[in-house]
């Protein structure tokens, strides 16, 4: 890893993400003509929405001029996530009851962008547009939309439920810890990490048991599990807290069993011994049974 130059797609994604983040220039200019607590009201009114749309259109025009083909596809996705992160920061720093949704937007956009960037660093050979995980699955998309709907409906009908600041802070801590653990797992595994379960062993594929893997057999899944649940705790979404917990638990139980079949095939007794020493890290999930 030392001295490795970041691949072109990774460098393009960084520039595009930062370009998307330039949406923050809008409230900075706005505050020159008013107070900070006016920014959210301005951005949610028609003039503010028009300014944001024009800004995004100009950015997309710049990307079309600068990049072509596959690089444009990388750039436009990274830029989109940068815009979402910037909008999340605006909401988080404004005087509004939507603050926790701003935290959520920042968490969501950073998770998806960092999945791509870290993959570009550790395993560029496996890097594709799917590394953003934006099209992870239909179920994942439905879960995200359902959380937005629940938050909006409950905010309109039970606004006091969305003002449980202590609960949102707990959710934020879960998100930060889960995100940190997942990225630590990816960086520790290096080129051994892949978003797709591998059925054939590559020559460079080794069994990673150090770092965070000394504490959990599947730290990337543990991190993702607590990150996803934490986003709903942050939003104070009682229905989705339960739904995300159950759905994530079932998904990772099946994923771990599938992955461990391959790992036992790849590393035989070495993995079996490792499996005996180290837990999966997820509650009530022990992985594939070995006779």
Image (cartoon, rainbow, N blue to C red):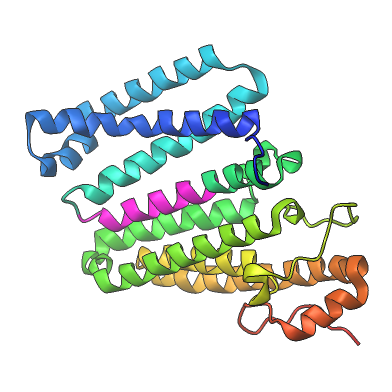
Give the quarter of the figure containing the C terminus. bottom right
Secondary structure, magenta segment, majority class: helix
Q: Is residue 240 visible?
A: no
User: Residue lying farthest left?
Assistant: 34
- Residue 183 appears in which quarter of the rendering? bottom right
Q: Is residue 197 above or below residue 25?
A: below
Relative to 215, is 196 on the left or the right? Answer: right
Q: Is residue 225 visible?
A: yes
Residue drawn 51% across the image and 60% down it: 179
Residue 200 in percent (x, y) is at 91, 55
Residue 108 in percent (x, y) is at 46, 51
Relative to 86, is 134 on the left or the right? Answer: right
Relative to 271, is 85 on the left or the right? Answer: left
Residue drawn 79% across the image and 79% down it: 274
**Observer-nearest residue: 67 or 104?**
67
User: Residue lying farthest front?
Assistant: 3
Q: Is residue 83 above or below residue 131?
A: above
In the image, residue 220 lies in the stretch drawn in magenta: no
Residue 177 in percent (x, y) is at 47, 67
Residue drawn 30% across the image and 58% down it: 100
**Observer-nearest residue: 170 or 184?**
184
Q: Which residues are magenta?
A: 97-112
């Amino acid at each position: 890893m030392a001295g490795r130059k970041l691949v072109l797609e990774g460098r393009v994604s960084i520039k595009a993400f930062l370009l998307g983040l330039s949406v923050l220039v809008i409230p900075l200019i706005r505050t020159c003509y008013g107070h900070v607590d006016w920014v959210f009201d301005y951005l949610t009114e028609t003039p503010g929405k028009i300014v944001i749309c024009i800004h995004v259109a100009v950015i997309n025009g710049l990307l079309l001029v600068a990049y072509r083909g596959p690089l444009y596809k990388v750039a436009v996705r990274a830029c989109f996530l940068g815009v979402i992160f910037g909008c999340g920061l605006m909401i988080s720093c404004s005087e509004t009851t939507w603050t926790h949704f701003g935290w959520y937007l920042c968490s969501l956009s950073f998770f998806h962008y960092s999945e791509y960037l870290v993959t570009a660093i550790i395993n560029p050979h496996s890097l594709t547009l799917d590394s953003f995980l934006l099209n992870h699955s239909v179920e994942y998309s439905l879960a995200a939309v359902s959380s937005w709907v629940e938050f909006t409906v409950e905010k309109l009908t039970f606004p006091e439920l969305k003002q449980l600041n202590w609960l949102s802070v707990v959710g934020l801590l879960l998100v930060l810890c889960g995100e940190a653990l997942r990225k630590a797992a990816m960086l520790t595994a290096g080129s051994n990490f892949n978003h797709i379960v591998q059925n054939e062993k590559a020559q460079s594929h080794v069994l990673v048991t150090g770092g965070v893997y000394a504490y959990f057999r599947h730290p990337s899944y543990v991190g993702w599990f607590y990150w996803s649940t934490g986003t709903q705790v942050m939003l104070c979404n009682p229905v989705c807290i339960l739904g995300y917990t159950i759905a994530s638990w079932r998904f990772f139980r099946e994923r771990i069993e599938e992955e461990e079949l391959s790992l036992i095939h790849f590393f035989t007794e070495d993995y079996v011994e490792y499996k005996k020493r180290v837990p999966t890290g997820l509650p009530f999930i022990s992985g594939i049974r070995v006779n």
